[in-house]
Amino acid sequence: GSRAPGVSAMSGLLDQAHITASALAGDNVGACKTLLDQLAPSITLQPDCIDIALKLQNVMGVLSLATEAVGPNESIELRCEAVRIRRGHEVRLVIAAAESQPPAICDPKLVALIAEARAAAKLLSAQPEKSLAAIATQHGRCRTRLGKLIELSCLAPDIITAIVNGFQPATLDSKALMSTHLPVTWTDQRKTLGFS
């Protein structure tokens, strides 16, 4: 039962991150600009790239995380390749295309496994007073599989998005994901599963 608050918090964080990403990708230019101003007080256009400094406290605030653990001046630096193209009096900024990407191939079994993992996390968080074994017994589930599903519910959001959109590595299927020991940090997860 002690893992339930962490699972619940992770689910909330993933939901908030999805909402934020949707706002940034949406059609409401005003809302997008307001959010960008809050997250990235410094965006610098260089001759061949854009440098973005995300203020860590603001990022954590937008994601509803406690901000006391980080200093007011801590930031995350991002760089995006871009080219300025002049046409008459107009200057356009063209973001460099990503490396040629293989076509998306959605794996229904892999997507179903991700959905099952999210459902398992909700099942556990709904009964924080019960142990994993007790919940498995109550619902006629295998305790080992349920434990693995809880582990998979903590996958990095970008990994989940890639899987749902069919951009997972060719070697990653549901069997491989179930048999892989999943690291705690998202960076290590990407390396282990072949996303970086």
Image (cartoon, rainbow, N blue to C red):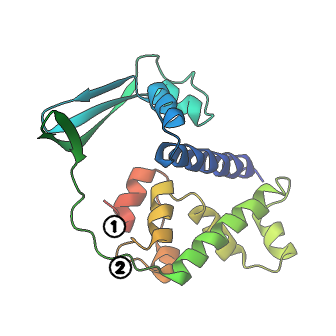
Hey, which quadrant is residue 191 in on the image? Answer: bottom left
Which residue is painted at 61% across and 28% down in the image?
A: 66
Q: Residue at horizontal 54%, vertical 32%?
A: 60
Residue contact at pointers 2 and 1, CB within 8 angstroms: yes
In front here: 34 or 120?
Answer: 34
98 vs 149, nearest the viewer: 98
In the image, what residue type sits under mark 1? Answer: Gly
Pick the residue in front: 169 or 100. Answer: 100
Task: Point out the tag, 2 or 1, that comes first from the N-terminus.
Answer: 2
Q: What residue is shown with label 1?
A: 194
Residue 188, by quadrant, is bottom left
Relative to 163, residue 55 above or below:
above
Real-space Cα separation, disc 2 to disc 1, in angstroms: 8 Å
Amino acid type, mark 2: Thr
Name the image quarter holding the C terminus.
bottom left
Q: Is residue 156 in view from this perspective?
A: no
Q: Which secondary structure, mark 1?
A: loop
Per the rendering, the mark at residue 171 is 2
- Residue at 48%, 38% in the rendered image: 29
Quick one: SS at disc 2?
Answer: loop
Residue 8: percent from left, percent from top:
71, 50
Going by the image, does 80 lie left or right of 8? left
User: Measured along the vertical axis of the image, is residue 42 above or below residue 78?
Assistant: above
Give me the disc on residue 68: none
Q: Is residue 47 left or right of residue 65?
A: left
x, y percent for residue 43 = 31, 28
Q: Residues within 10 Å of mark 1 (few under 14, many from 20)?
A: some
Residue at the image point whose x is 51% and y is 28% from the top: 34
Between residue 62 and residue 5, name the one nearer to us: 62
Please identify the quarter of the rendering in which residue 162 is found.
bottom left
